[in-house]
Amino acid sequence: MQVNETLSEGLKRALTVTIAASELDSRLSERLTELKARARIKGFRPGKVPVNHLRRVYGKAAMAEIVETMVGETTRQALSDRGERAAMQPKVAMTEDEAEAMEVLEGKADLTFTLEYEVLPDYELGDFKGLKIERPVADVTDEEIEERVTQVAESTRSYEPVERAAADGDRVTFDYVGKTGGETFESSTTSIVLGSGQFIPGFEEQLTGVSAGQEKTFGVTFPEAYPAENLAGKPASFDVKINEVAAPADITIDDAFAERLGLESLEKLRDTVRQQIESEYGQTTRQHVKRQMLDQLDTMHTFPLPENLVEQEFESIWKQVMHDVEHHGRTFEAEGTTEEAARADYRGIAERRVRLGLVLSKIGEAAEVTVSDEELQGALYNQARQFRGQEQQVFDYYKQNPDAVQALRAPIFEEKVVDYLLELADVTDKSVSKDELAALAEDESVPDHHHHDHDH
């Protein structure tokens, strides 16, 4: 293998790699010798097919496989010999001349190809030990627990049919046919509790005062931000037939109620609710702490970034932005900006993500942070659980896509590095109210999830 550097500019590299025809032929002979033992060709006894005959029959196909294998091997070897780590998989280019390519496959010419890639930047880590963190902590009050318990009770409330017009709080069960542009988009049977705001604006108002057996047709307009793109912002008509009007039964929050939920007592229900709220608050606290940590790491590190990584990250963000513009009524003008300014802002976010991804990766590598097979398996099972009845397809997908597995590994690795940094950080707890904590959560507007998990 012969390697010549043709470009070394900043983080960009280009190499020309040549593999001698004799080396390719040696590999081909090895492959054909292996094939000889198991080849079944009419007119020859098993194991007795001459290698020259195999070369005529299988030579080009076998050489094509060898070329593909050796390009991968020599690419890894070339980077290893140079002591470089590519930010992304190097771009490989081979001759497009059919005659030249055929000469290589026939063993008459050397294989020459080019590699283009960017190296990971070489930089010194800042003083990340002892980052100053203010951790907001909100205590769960008895009032919040009772409010949540009442919500649980409301969600399990039973309803009794009544022979009267539907009023606020009643449950209305009905058949409906939804049409837009004269075409039916959905027909089904459903129930709605009046006043719950479950359906699109204007729908519930049309059901107030209806009675069992009544039929009516009315029009509403889907909101611009409606998730179903084919309906967002469109006027629709609904033909409805009321099957039942039912009034809410009284609820009593006591031990018997808790037992119906599968818990030992009302006290146990309250404890369960407390833990749930504490977990929710803990997640918000964690995100705020992580944001402070990332802000400080971002400030203390300045180094050149691989353009390809930044571009890939930006394209991922921009794709979502444009989806929101095209399908959910979002406009740059409404947000007080322009497309050009927004592109610049989101490119800045992409650069921050890549920079922090590299920094966290380097810190984790130095601290020997690893992701265990058990942790990866747990993440895979969590993914599969979201697709009930299709678990096997999910497992098969990850088995066949190493990049997808890497995408599962990256956030686990990142959170473990954050844990490591927190152990070293100078953390001060600050007591806040639940409203103050909620306000902090709303401020977490810049996403810091990285798609890359370099060499981990």
Image: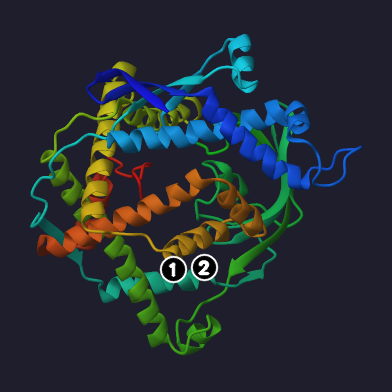
Disc 2 from disc 1: Cα separation: 6 Å
Judging depth in this view, the residue of 438 and 200 nearest the camera is: 438
Q: Is residue 359 left or right of residue 246?
A: left
State the residue position of label 2: 155
The amino acid beneath tag 2 is Ser
Q: Which mark is residue 151?
A: 1
Q: Is residue 375 left or right of residue 51?
A: left
Name above or below for residue 74 compared with residue 207. above
In the image, residue 54 lies at what x, y percent? Answer: 76, 33
Disc 2 vs disc 1: Cβ atoms closer than 8 Å?
Answer: yes
Q: Position of residue 364 (x, y in %)?
A: 25, 54
Question: What element does badge 1 sit on?
Answer: helix
Residue 178 screen position, x and y as percent: 69, 39
Q: Give the residue displayed 24% in from the left and 37% down from the top.
A: 355
Residue located at (29% from left, 43% from top): 448
Residue at the outermost right position: 43
Q: Nearer the viewer, residue 218 or 404?
A: 404
Task: Give above or below for 115 relative to 381.
Answer: above
Q: Residue at x 70, y 65 (%)?
A: 163
Question: Can residue 72 be seen?
Answer: yes
Against 195, residue 115 (above or below) is above
Secondary structure at numbered mark 2: helix
For the point 25% across and 26% down, which residue is it? 11
Type of amino acid under label 1:
Gln
**Residue 168: image location, x then y, percent:** 53, 58
